């Protein structure tokens, strides 16, 4: 059993609310993504937090799409977000959209106008920004702040009817131009945008700003705990101002530190650049930090949920080491991945005293970490095998426990062999290795009495199949590419992908299952890619067996 952990600050708040009978003991959270891109690992943390905290306290979570900017949103993103949340293992109570509330939000805006708390401003974006002042200087009113209630009502109705072009007018809240919080200096509530909306079509040409739509949507749904990231701390007073003056359900906003991971970028804008400028093959490229990219690379829902649990919930921003995410997937795959043998840089090994043409079936467990091995598979063995080129050394170094002239090793699941000689081709490259085997040394029934220190993997040449292997590594070669000088794309790791076009795989891998993890013995963890075909399987490396980057750091 895992050790009992202490409550995080959000759990402490919820437990206090429950003990005080707040909201009648009801817990309702929400996950409110904007459908303008694919979700990434940072969103996964928020998903695990919102859904997980509600699940822990017998509450519920709404999925609400923040679809208030039609020019950047798409149904493709809506569908991918749904799929990602379900894949992570969560179910939402209601699927909702900010656009469900456009009529109500318009009425709320009219109410504020009638109270003298909102006005239509004809100033340009530059003029509004200049008039807002600075953190050390108060703002000043634009000429339109003193418009009458009647004029504002008429103008806002005309904005809604489509009378004005984009950018001609905005609706602003009338709050406090001298407030030390810049977000309270008459913030924008509505802007004109003649754009087709993926759900409401052309009904609207004015759209609410995030700060006006978000809190009111929470209140309409009676969200008890609106959990968001730290950048929204300055927005909270405005969130509360709108709810208070509209006399709505008192939803409350709570903030936690967003997830930042080294050797990657988490900005949707930057991820979109990588996609549009073809630095990656798409949103689901296995090098991307998107949930769909991680899924395609072979990450499991459990590994991501465990990662979110391990990093915890903090109030201060920090940079999480990617190695922790990699540790979580290794930990999971070690228990679940089926073991298979794959030779990526093959050299022919010939067993000269094994009967030519004979094929013997060896047996290998699918997963020796699990009691019972999760079943087994048969592995054909013959006189001609493929082994890794770097498992042979012409002049073996001291303490070299693999194959070399006169040396003995065990072939995994098979026999002990001894190298007799080797042959080179015209380029001086070793082309064939000749060995003898010890018949009494078969794995599982070894009576030879011989002990060897090395074991290597192999694939029988008889019946061998080939596959493409994609070796993925970190997308960036620096820890924090967003904070480096110049364009972040200058720091892309040129070795983030290398492809082995014709690796030799044991025959069972022809039947590899989509979504299953495989440990290629001594090589790493892999999964079948969507580009695979029965004629040519394609495998993606999920993660190496050990943290190779940690070794590089130590060497440096």
Image (cartoon, helix red, strand yellow):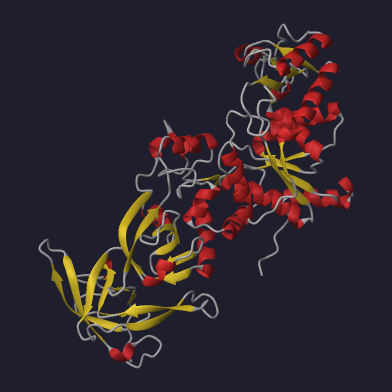
451 on left or right of 528: left
Above or below 147: residue 367: below
Q: Is residue 240 above or below residue 498?
A: above
Side of 115 where 46 appears, left or right = left
- Which residue is depicted at the point 35% across and 48% down? 495
**Would you say residue 517 is visible in this rendering?**
yes
Q: Closer to the camera, 447 or 317? A: 447
What x and y, as percent, mark residue 549?
41, 54
| Residue at the extreme left | 426
The image position of residue 50, as x and y in percent, is 70, 48
Query: Which percent across, then down, holds residue 223?
Result: 79, 42
Res 259 seen here: no
Q: At 38% from the left edge and 65% from the top edge, which residue is drawn?
A: 523
Residue 536, horizontal then vertical, whole percent = 36, 60
Q: Residue 346 is drawn in which quadrant?
A: bottom left
> Residue drawn at (44%, 60%), measured in percent from left and top?
528
Q: Give above or below for 205 relative to 525.
A: above
- For the N terminus, give its image quadrant: bottom right
Number of numbered discs: 0
| Quadrant in the rendering for residue 221 | top right
Out of 31 and 463, give the one closest to the viewer.
463
Q: Is residue 293 left or right of residue 113?
A: left
The reply, left or right, for residue 172 in relation to residue 489 is: right
Relative to 324, residue 30 above or below: above
């Amino acid at each position: 059993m895992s050790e009992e952990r202490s409550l995080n600050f959000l759990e402490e708040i919820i437990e206090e609310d429950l003990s005080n009978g707040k909201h009648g003991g009801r817990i309702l959270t929400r996950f409110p993504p904007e459908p303008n891109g694919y979700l990434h690992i940072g969103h996964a943390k928020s998903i695990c937090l919102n859904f997980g905290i509600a699940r822990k306290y017998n509450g519920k979570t709404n999925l609400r799409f923040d679809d208030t900017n039609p020019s950047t949103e798409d149904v493709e993103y809506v569908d991918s977000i749904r799929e990602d949340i379900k894949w992570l293992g969560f179910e939402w109570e209601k699927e909702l959209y900010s656009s469900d509330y456009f009529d109500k939000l318009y009425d709320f805006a009219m109410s504020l106008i009638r109270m003298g708390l909102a006005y239509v401003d004809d100033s340009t974006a530059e003029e509004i920004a200049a008039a807002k002042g600075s953190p050390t200087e108060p703002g000043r009113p634009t000429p339109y702040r003193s418009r009458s209630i009647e004029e504002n009502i008429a103008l806002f109705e005309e904005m809604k009817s489509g009378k004005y072009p984009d950018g001609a007018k905005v609706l602003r809240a009338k709050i406090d131009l001298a407030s030390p919080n810049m977000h309270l200096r008459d913030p924008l509530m509505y802007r004109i945008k003649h754009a087709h909306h993926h759900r409401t079509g052309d009904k609207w040409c004015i759209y609410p700003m995030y700060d006006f739509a978000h809190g009111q949507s929470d209140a309409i749904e009676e969200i008890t705990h609106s959990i968001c990231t730290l950048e929204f701390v300055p927005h909270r007073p405005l969130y509360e101002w709108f709810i208070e003056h509209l006399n709505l359900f008192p939803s409350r906003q709570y903030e936690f530190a967003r997830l930042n991971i080294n050797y990657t970028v988490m900005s949707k804008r930057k991820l979109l650049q990588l996609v549009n400028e073809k630095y990656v093959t798409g949103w689901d490229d296995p090098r991307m930090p998107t949930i769909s990219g991680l899924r395609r690379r072979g990450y499991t829902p459990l590994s991501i949920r465990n990662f979110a649990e391990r990093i915890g919930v903090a109030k201060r921003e920090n940079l999480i080491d990617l190695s922790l995410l990699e540790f979580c997937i290794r930990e999971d795959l070690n228990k679940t991945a089926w073991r298979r043998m794959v030779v990526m840089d093959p050299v022919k090994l010939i067993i000269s005293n094994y009967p030519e043409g004979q094929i013997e079936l060896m047996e290998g467990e699918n997963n020796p970490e699990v009691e019972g091995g999760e079943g087994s598979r048969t592995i054909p063995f013959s006189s001609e095998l493929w082994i890794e080129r770097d498992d042979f050394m012409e002049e073996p170094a001291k303490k070299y426990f693999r194959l070399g002239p006169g040396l003995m090793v065990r072939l995994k699941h098979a026999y002990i062999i001894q190298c007799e000689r080797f042959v080179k081709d015209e380029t001086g490259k070793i082309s064939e290795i000749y060995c003898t085997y010890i018949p009494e040394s078969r794995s599982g029934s070894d009576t030879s009495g011989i002990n060897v220190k090395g074991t290597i993997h192999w694939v029988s040449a008889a019946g061998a199949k080939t596959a493409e292997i994609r070796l993925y590594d970190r997308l960036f070669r620096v820890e924090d590419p967003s904070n480096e000088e110049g364009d972040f794309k200058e720091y892309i790791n040129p070795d983030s992908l290398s492809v082995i076009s014709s690796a030799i795989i044991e025959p069972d891998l022809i039947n590899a299952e989509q979504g299953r993890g495989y440990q290629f013995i001594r090589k790493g963890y892999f999964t079948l890619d969507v580009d695979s075909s029965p004629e040519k399987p394609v495998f993606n490396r999920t993660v190496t067996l050990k943290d190779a980057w940690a070794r590089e750091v130590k060497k440096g």
